[in-house]
Image: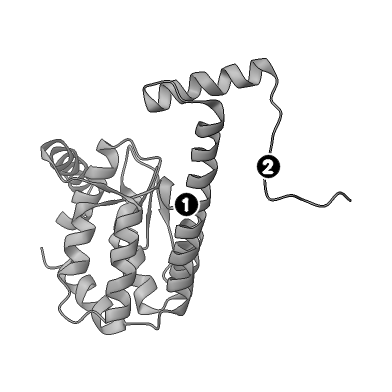
Amino acid sequence: MARKTGDLTIRLDRASRAKIDRLAERRLGRKRSTGTFLKMLALSAVEREERASELRRMLRSLPADPGAAEEIARRRRED
Amino acid sequence: MTVIDTSLFVEAQRGREPARQRLDDLLRNPEDLAISAMTILEVYAAPRMSAAWSRFYAKVFDAVEVLDLDFDAAEEGARLARDMARRGFKLHNADAAVAGCAARAGAAVIVAADGDFTELRRIRVEYVQPS
């Protein structure tokens, strides 16, 4: 297996590239290079994944807090 | 869009495993999630929230879409509550606010651990048994 370099180059056929460029223009409201747009998409996917992982990690480590939970439940039944 | 009702957070905070598991599952895709502004009010009004849960809620509320309880959402919630009352069911004001926000935003589903929601019409409800 070939050793990976740090840089990444991808090949796109003309039709795929045109589709991506149209999507970029729709989403961003202006033209951006295909590479820049793809990089934005990929990085935002990574950020989303990191945010989701952090939330789930926090939830799993939280001890139960029945006192505060009961307080919220009681107040929402007062009307 | 999936709207998380306050009741799911409450049951998770109580330590009920089904609610925790469902919440954990939903948090895989925070960008598809929303809460009503009413949920923020209900949660932050609790006077004795632990610091750890406060931090968690702050992160969640920052990561998901927050649906405003504006005129249209309030009117929609009132309509849903009236419809239930005519059928002999009660929808508390907080629940009506959440349902109104969800209906107004065109949410696909409300995930709740509160049985009152199951009688709602015109909006799909996923009921998570507390235990």
Q: Amino acid at mark 2?
A: Leu
Work out how far the residue at label 2 is from the one at label 1, CA to CA, in angstroms. Answer: 21 Å
Q: Please state which amino acid type lies under the numbered disc 1.
A: Arg
Q: Secondary structure at mark 1?
A: helix
At x 82% / y 52%, what residue is drawn?
Answer: A3
Residue A11 shown left or right of residue B104 in the figure: right
Quadrant showing the N terminus of chain B: top left
Residue B108, placed above or below residue B14? above
Q: Is residue B5 visible?
A: no
Residue B53 seen: yes
Residue at the spot of label 2: A8
Instruction: From the viewer's perspective, tell me whether residue B7 is left or right of residue B94.
Output: right
**Which residue is more in the foreground, B58 or B92?**
B58
Q: Residue B2: x and y, percent?
A: 40, 47
Foreground residue among B87 and B113: B113
Contact (Cβ within 8 Å) of mark 2 with mark 1 = no
Which image quadrant: the C terminus of chain B? bottom left
Which residue appears farthest toward the right when viewing the image?
A1
The quadrant where residue B62 appears: bottom left
Name the residue carrying label 1: A48
